[in-house]
Amino acid sequence: MTKTITDVICPFCGTLCDDIEVTVSDDGKKILEVFNACAIGNEKFHHAMAKDRPVRPRMQQADGTYKEVSYDEAVEYTAQMLANAKKPLMYGWSSTNCEAQSIGHEIAEAVGAVVDNTAAVCHGTTLIAVQDVGIPSCTLGEIKNRADRILFWGCNPAHAHPRHMSRYSIFPRGFFTGKGSQSRKLIVVDPRHSDTSKLADVYYQVEQGRDYELLQAFRTALKGEWLPDVVAGIPKERIYEGAELMKSGRFGIIFFGMGVTQTLGKNHNIDAAISLTKDLNEYTKFSIMPMRGHYNVTGSGEVLAWQFGFPYSVDLSRGYARYNPGDTSSIDLLIRGEVDSVFTIASDPGAHFPISAVKRIASLPSVAVDPHITPTTEVSKLHVPVAFVGIEVGGNAYRMDNVPIDTRKVVDPPEGVLTDEQFLERVLIRVKELKGVKA
Amino acid sequence: MTEFLIKNGFVFDPTLKIKGDVADVAIKNGKIVETDAVKKPKVIDASGKTVMAGGLEIHAHIAGPKVNVGRIYRPEDKLFNATAGLKATPTHMNTRMEGGFSIPTTYKTGYNYARLGYTTAMEAAMPPLFARHVHEEMRDTPIIDEGAYPVFGNNWFVLEYIKNREINNTAAYIAWLLEATKGFAIKSVNPGGTEAWGWGLNCLQVTDPVPYFDVTPQEITTGLIEANELLGLPHSLHIHGNNLGNPGNYTTTLDTLKAAEGHKAKNKFHREQVLHHTHIQFHSYGGDKWANFESKARPIMDYVNKHKNITVDVGFVTLDETTTMTADGPFEHHLTELNHLKWANVDVELETAAGVVPYVYSPDIFVCGVQWAIGLEIALLSKDPMRCFITTDHPNAGPFTRYPRILKWLMSQKARDEQIKAFKNSDKVVNGSEIASFDRELTLYEVAAMTRAGPAKALGLSHMYGGLKPGLDADVAVYNFNPEKENSPDEIEKAFSTVQYLFKTGEKIIKDGEIVSNGNKRTLWVHAKVEENPQVMRDIEEKFVKYYTVTKGNYEVHGKHFIPNPLAIEVDAT
Amino acid sequence: MPKITLNLISGRTIQQGVAIEAGKEKPSYREACGIIEIDPVDFKQLGAWRNTNVRVTSAYGHVIVKAVEATQGPHPGIAFIPMGPWANQVVNPRTYSTGMPTFKGTPIEVEPAPSEEVLDGIRVVQEAVRGAKV
C-alpha cells in the first residue's frame, strides 16, 4: 500500500507552494509520485531519490579528487576550520530551515564569523532600498482577493516562480476578484519580451539598464507633469497611459525581481519603485513585493534580524554585530581577500558568484554542506552531504511575503545521512569546546 | 531546586497589602512559600532594598513580523548600542550578542526586561497568519514568560459573524484560532478600520460602517466583549480603539469605552474588567488641529475611574527617537504623510494589517510635550492603580527600557517640573495640559499595583503572577532602592534601571545586576474548550479553500521548534 | 571570423531550474545553461548557424557556450545566458559598494568557436579556479 501525504510544502522557490501531494511507498522510503508541483518542484522531490547521490562526507585530496570520510571527521574539520579562522565567512542558509539557521548563528557568534545569505546576489539591494525608503507591502492572499492591477517589473515568474501567477497573482478567483484574470490588468516591464510579458495587457520593453529613468517617469506622469518624448525607449504617451492605468485600479501591486536589483542603479532602482508605490497610495491602494528566489532566503533574513538586528551581510568578527553592504558583504569580502575560510550551506556560490569570487573560495579552507553535488562542493575542501529540508526533514521557512510555513518531512533520508541541524549541532558543540564557551 | 530567603527588604505588594514593611520572602520549588517552609535556604540580604514581585508587561510589541520589519529596515537603531556575545565573553555566562534601542534583538529584549525586574511580557498584536513567526521570536527571547494576543477586530470571520449577530459562532471561531495560533487573548486594533485600509480607507468613528462587510466598529467591539465573556477567557477584550493619534479623538475613545456598559465579567480567573483599552494616552487628545492640540486626560480618566469594568494602560511618551508599529495600518500611513519618514506596511489576508514608521518625540515640538504630559496625567488622575497600568506601548511611545524614567516622573513632582522647564515650548505645553498643576507623587505601593498586581489581575493570571503571596510563582525583583531615604529623581531612575537580584519561577536570573541564567521561559496560551460547532468548522474549511493562500493544514502552529515550553491556561466553555 | 558586441544579461529559466535540481554534474545542466540566447538580427551579423559554439569575452573573462536563437525576444543587441557558472565567467563582478555584482548589463564580444567544447557545470568552474592562490 502506498500512502499519500497532503499539504506538502515545496522547498524550491519563494512561492513556497503548500498544496503539494506526494505519494510514497509503504515503507516511507521512496517518493513515487508528486502532484500539483511545477516542473522544478517535481524534479526536486524526485532528485532526492537519485541513486548516485552522495551519502557520506568527501574530502578533497592533493590531486583534486575526493575521498569519503566519516561525519566525525567532517565535524572535526569544520569546527577546527571555523575556530581557527580569524574571519570566516558562513554563507548560504537560503535552502535550509530556520532551526538550522539558528544553530549556525550561534556557531558564527562563537567564532566571530561573517554570516551572509543569498540575498547577497539576489534581493540584497532591495533590503538596502527598504532601509532607505521603507516598503508598503502585503501578503499574497491580499493580491489574490483584492488586486486588479498587477505589475511585473524585471521579473519573469513564468520561468522563475512557475505557480505564482496561478496561485496568487493573475488567475485565482478571490473574494473581491471573482472573475480571476478578467478582474485584473497585467503590466509587464522587461527588456526581453519574456514569457510573462506575453500574457500582459500592457508591455513596456524598457531599454536594459534604464529602469530607474522609467520608474521616475511614471512618478512624474502620476502627477501629470512634463516628460520628454521618449524615456528608456518608451514614448511618453504610453507612460502617461500606464500611470493612469495604475491609478484607476482599486488595489495594485508591483512585483519586481533581479531585472532591477542586479542592474546598474541597483538599490536606487528599488528606491524609485518603492517611491512610486508610495506615491500611488495618494490615489488608491498599492503594494510592492520582491520576488524572493530561494524558498527560505526570506527566513534567513528574518532570523538574522531578530537575533542580530540585520537581515544579511552580518559581520560578527568583532564580537558584536556589524552591517555594511559593500564592506561586510560576501562578494566584496571574497574579492578583496578579507576572509580566511569559507563555510557554505544550502546554496551554491560556486555556480552563482562571479568567478573571481569563486576562485577565492577554492583557494581557502572551505566546507560545503549541500545534499547535491554542485560547483561549490567540487571546489571546496570538504563536502558534507545532508538530508533535503522539506523532503527528508521538516522545519520552518518564510515565503516571499514573509509568511512562515512549516515544511514537512515526506520520506526518510538515506541511511546515516545527517540533517543540517544535526550536523550543525555537532559542530556547535565542538566549536564551543575549542573556544572554551560555557555550554 | 535551590531554596532562597530574601531577608529584611522593604516589601511592596498589593496582593498582601504590604506597603513597604520590612519582611522576608521565601522561595521553594519555583513558588513563593511561607518563610518557615524553607529549610536550608540561600539567604539574600535585602536590607535597605526594595522587594517586589516580578513586573508584568501587559502590552508591548516585542516579537513578530512588524517588530522584525522594524529591525530589518532600521539598521540605524543599532548604532553605538551593540554589545558583545559568546565570542568576547566565552567563559562568562552564556549570554548572546545584544543590539538595538527601540527594536532590540530578541535576546536583548529578554535580558532588558529581566534587568528592569520584569518576568512576564505580552506581545500585543499577533497576526494569526504570522503566528509561527511570533512564536519563533518568543522562543529566542530568554528568561521572561510570554504570551501573544492574536488580532480579531478586522478578521473576516468575526466581521461576518458579528454582522449576523452570531456570538456563539464568533466565540467558537475565537476558541479555534486561539488554539491554532497558540494565542492568549482577544486583541482588536482599530476595529473595522484596518479592513477598510485594504482599500486605502479607514473607520475613524465607531459608527463608520466597514466597506462591504457593513458592520460598525461599535458592533465589532460589543460582539467581541460578548464572545469573550461567553468563553470566560482569562483576559478581557484588549482594544486599541478607532481614531488613534488624532486631535479631538477623545470623544471617539469615550464612544469606544461605552461598549463596555452593561457588561459584566464572567470568568473563573478573578478578572473584573470586560474591556481593556490600551495606550489610552494616544486616544485622549483634544483640539481639532495640531495647532490647538490639548490634553483630554481628565474626561477620559473621569470615565475610567467611574467604570469598574474597564482597565487601561497608558502608553507614556518618553521623548525618544523610536519606531512606531501597529496593526492600525491607516494610522501609520497618516503618520508617514506627517513626518515623511520611511513607511512599511503589511496587509494580511482576511485578518489584519500592520504599519511601521520611525518617529522622533522631540522635546522641541509642542505636540510631543503635550503627549508626554497626557501620559503622566492619566496615571496621576487614576483613582485605582489596580486598573491603570504602566506601558509605553513599546516601542510606539518609547522603548520599555524607559520605565525607570517614567517612574521618576510619576514619583517626583520635581522631576516633572525639570522636564517641563526643559521643553522648548514650555508655555504651550503647560497651556495645553494640566500637568504643571499636579502635585501627586505615586508611592511604590501604587507602582507595584500598576506594574505587578494590576496587570496580573487584568490578565486573569493573578493565580500565578503579580504578588508575593505564598503559592504564586517565585518571580521576585530586588532593587537597590531605600524608600526611607530621601531619593533624588535621578537616583529613582538609576535604582529601577537594573535590579540587584531577580528570580524567575524560583531560579536566580540576576545577581548583583549581572545575568547569571537564561532561565526557563514559558509560552502562555489559552486553550478554550467549546461545544462542537459544525457550521464554524465548515466556514473555516471554506475560507481556507477559497481565500487563504495557505492550506488549513499548514496554518496551525505545532511543534517544539516553535514552543519548546508551553503553558496552556485551560478554559472550559462547554 | 566576425565578432559582434552585445549587452549581456543573465537570469533564470525554467530549464535552468529543472536542471539544477536534477544535478549540476549532469549533461542537462550544460544543455540548459551553457548557452547564449541571441536575437535573429544579431545572428545575422555574427554569421554563424544556430546551435554553433561561440566564445564570449568580456573585460572579466571568457567562456565557451552554444549560441541559440532567443526564446523570449525579440531583443536586438541583448544577449542572454541563463544564470549559472557559464554566465559567471564573464559577468561584471563589481558591486560598486552595494554588495551586489552587476549580473545584468555586461558588454561582451561574441565570436564563433565551432571547434571548441562547452564544458560541463562542474568543470567550467574547476578549470577556472585551478591554481587559484590566496
Image (cartoon, coloured by chain):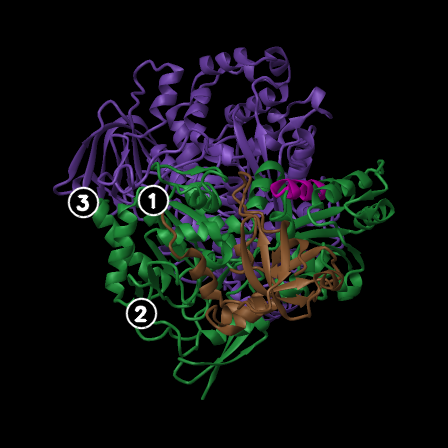
Specify the segment rendered in magenta. A265-277
Up-down: is A42 above or below B483?
below
Q: Is label 2 in contact with label 1 (beta carbons under 8 Å)?
A: no
Check disc 1: other Cα within 10 Å, few if <14, some if 14-19, many if 20+.
many
- Let me know if residue B137 is in the magenta part: no
Q: Quadrant of residue C49?
A: bottom right
Check disc 2: other Cα within 10 Å, few if <14, some if 14-19, many if 20+.
some
Residue A374 point in image, percent of width and height: 44, 64
- Give the SS element for disc 3: loop
Camera-side mark, 2 or 1: 2
Residue placed under numbered mark 3 in the picture: B2
Specify the subunit that label 1 lies on. A
Residue type at tag 1: Glu
Check disc 3: other Cα within 10 Å, few if <14, some if 14-19, many if 20+.
some
Residue placed under numbered mark 1 in the picture: A109
Residue placed under numbered mark 2 in the picture: A56
Q: Is label 3 in contact with label 2 (beta carbons under 8 Å)?
A: no
Q: Colour of chain A?
A: green
Q: Which chain is brown?
A: C
Distance of label 2 from label 1 (alpha carbons): 28 Å
Q: Is residue B531 visible?
A: no
Residue at image coords 69%, 36%:
B334
Distance of label 3 from label 2 (alpha carbons): 46 Å
Specify the subunit that label 3 lies on. B
